[in-house]
Image (cartoon, rainbow, N blue to C red):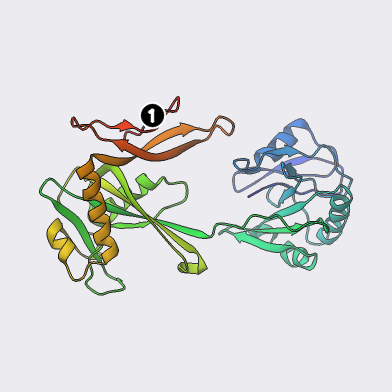
Amino acid sequence: MSRALFVIPQRLLSIVRCNQVPLITRHSSKMSEQAESNIVKGADSWFNKYTAVESSPEGTFKGVKDRFNGITVDSCMETCSPESFPTVLKRSLEHWIQSKHRGIWFKVHLTAASWIPELVNNGFQFHHAKNSFVMLYRWLPTDETANIPPYSHTMVGVGALVINDRNQVLVVSENNALIVGSWKLPGGYVEPNENFIDAAIREVTEETNIRTKFESVISIRHAHGAGFGCSDLYIVMALTPLSEEITKCNREIAKCEWMDVDAYLAHPKVHETNRNFVRTYLEYKRHGLRIDCTEEMHQVLRKRYNIYSIAKVPEGGNVTSSSSSTGTTTLKL
């Protein structure tokens, strides 16, 4: 979510380096414009808009303010010694409460892990963690319910339905399958900052060495109670093969082959859900439909995102997307 900075009660501003990122050690309540700029750039502004805090009392953390009147402090941007931390935290909380701030976030990196017990002792709770940091928060208002969004609670996976010109489907049997010897579609989890389509193409390549290109989204399966207590979102899409010689990944895959579609639909070791994915795809083909992917730009955030919508496939095979928004283009994948 948010990210921000820390402050120490001394008189000089200095810039140091930590993990190749410019860091700011604050020794005064007044910072230079360049330092303020570096601090704001250290925040994650995709979801929340962050602005530099105009001023803060001597001996307090500065942080950055988000659009919900919250403050985020990042231990890799503002530093504070373990000995000084309890005092600086106490003064900062008193200032934030008096200023009527709401959610206070601390992004604590491994180098500042000694802060964590003191934060917990002062009412902070864990929100999420990655390999190199943990994010803690405290909701300050006592007259309203905490309005803190939950961290990611859904795991996202992709499956790829690859059918060649001989009406054969690419299928795999995993080494660690729930049902030994069962046949499924190639696929796996989407990686951070990876599009669904790119993930499906990558998984097919990694598991079978077959090159593919995007054709259509087929189905979305949603379930709960998956790994780590998360929900599970599984997106299945049709890919057109650009090669057909299989070289399986021995680490993950026990068997891999091109199987006749009719044989796959009747195979006793194919889950009914997978059969339905194939039936759905064949029904799309029969009606000349597909679920296409277009790319658009958010006019405020200036971030690109993908839009999936139904498109009619004319007899010539070219797609006419159902989306008519200005600036929308069909992805060339």
The residue at 73%/58% (across/down) is 146
Q: Residue furthest front?
A: 287
| Dot 1 alpha-carbon crowd within 10 angstroms: few under 14, some 14 to 19, many 20 or more | some
- Closest to the observer, 146 or 75: 146
The residue at 81%/55% (across/down) is 141
| Image quadrant occupied by the C terminus | top left
Q: Is residue 25 left or right of residue 217?
A: right
Asked if residue 288 is positioned above or below residue 190 in the image, the reply reads: above
Q: Residue furthest left?
A: 166
Which type of secondary structure does the marked residue at label 1 adopt? strand
Q: Is residue 246 visible?
A: no
What x and y, as percent, mark residue 288?
A: 23, 39
What x and y, as percent, mark residue 228?
A: 50, 68
Callout 1 amino acid: Thr
What x and y, as percent, mark residue 91?
A: 88, 54
- Displayed quadrant of residue 290: top left
The residue at 10%/49% (across/down) is 166
Residue marked by disc 1: 329
Q: Is residue 255 visible?
A: yes
- Closest to the observer, 252 or 159: 159
Q: Is residue 63 left or right of residue 291?
A: right
Asked if residue 138 is positioned above or below residue 181 in the image, the reply reads: above
- Closest to the observer, 68 or 86: 68
What x and y, as percent, mark residue 293?
A: 37, 38
- Closest to the observer, 204 or 85: 204
- Displayed quadrant of residue 170: bottom left
Asked if residue 37 is positioned above or below residue 212 in the image, the reply reads: above
